[in-house]
Amino acid sequence: MKILRSIAAGLLMFAISSLQAQKNDLGAWYMYFGNNKISKKLNWHNEIQYRNFDAGGDLEQLLIRTGIGYDLTENNNNILLGYGFILSQPYVNGEKTENIEHRIFQQYIMKQKFGRFNIQHRYRLEERILEDDFRMRFRYFLGFNIPINNKELVPKTFYVSAYNEIFLHLDTPVFDRNRVYGALGYVINKNMRIEAGYMNQIQENRNRGQIQVGFYNNIPFTKN
């Protein structure tokens, strides 16, 4: 527990110090991801993301997402149906506004392993129900986790994490955004890990950086 507290404190200090050093347009995302087995084939996905314009206190977006997935093969090739609630508080002409979005999504995740490279492909289709609009969007995520001090992602392993994700509208304009991410992570035990890193988000007329701190929980609800 001392090691866990030290690592968590260090990651938090890293995020805060980075934000204090760069007070331009750098934001911070604090994220929790759960992927919990509820049977041999079924899993429950749950996540909360608290996104800020700065280190904390100036909310940009609160995202809550959940869903039920099914493994087509053992611990792989997962299909999932989910729902997301998104509260956004953007600035418009210097004044803070509020928008609520309800989101239905379907996704397929495939995992691969080549040597030390743990690779994940995620294909996601979203139906976005906005206050005065309806949109559909496709996302493709390619992620890598590479252990450093061990050959596998076993407990007490440090690892490098990286991903690229592109977002495409199903109408015009087609391009929505692209995210590029790099981080350092630590495997706490076989069901928990933490990460801290930097993500750059590229949109048509904007390029913005985000410090990210994430906690991942895979504790199963069943022993099957």
Image (cartoon, helix red, strand yellow):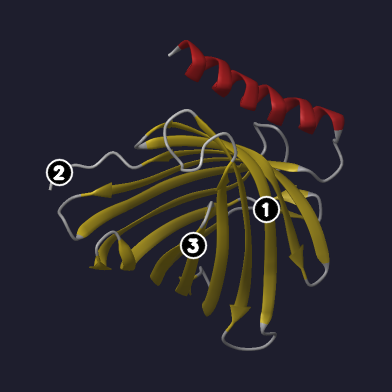
Residue type at mark 3: give it.
Answer: Gln
- Left or right: 76, with 118 as reference point: left
Q: Residue furthest bottom?
A: 171
**Residues under labels 1 and 2: Cα distance?**
33 Å
Q: Classify 9 as above or below 170.
A: above
Find disc 2 in the rendering and name its residue: 222
The reply to whether residue 212 is visible in this rendering is no
Number of dots carrying numbers: 3
Mark closer to the chain start, 2 or 3? 3
Viewer-closest of 198 and 24: 198
Asked if the residues shown at circle 1 and circle 3 are in contact, with their CB atoms under 8 angstroms apart, the answer is no
- Left or right: 194, with 102 as reference point: right
Q: Which mark is residue 53?
A: none
Q: Residue furthest top?
A: 2
- Left or right: 145, with 203 as reference point: left
Find disc 3 in the rendering and name its residue: 120
Position of residue 114 measured from the top left corner of the image (x, y, whole percent): 51, 61
Residue type at mark 2: give it.
Answer: Thr
Position of residue 54 measured from the top left corner of the image (x, y, whole percent): 73, 37
* Label 3 secondary element: strand
What's the residue at 47%, 28% (across, down)? Answer: 156
Q: Classify 199 as above or below 168.
A: above
Mark 1 or 3: the one toward you: 3
Location of the N terminus by quadrant is top left
* Label 1 secondary element: strand
**Residues under labels 2 and 3: Cα distance?**
24 Å
Q: Which mark is residue 181?
A: 1
- Residue 213 occupies quadrant: top right
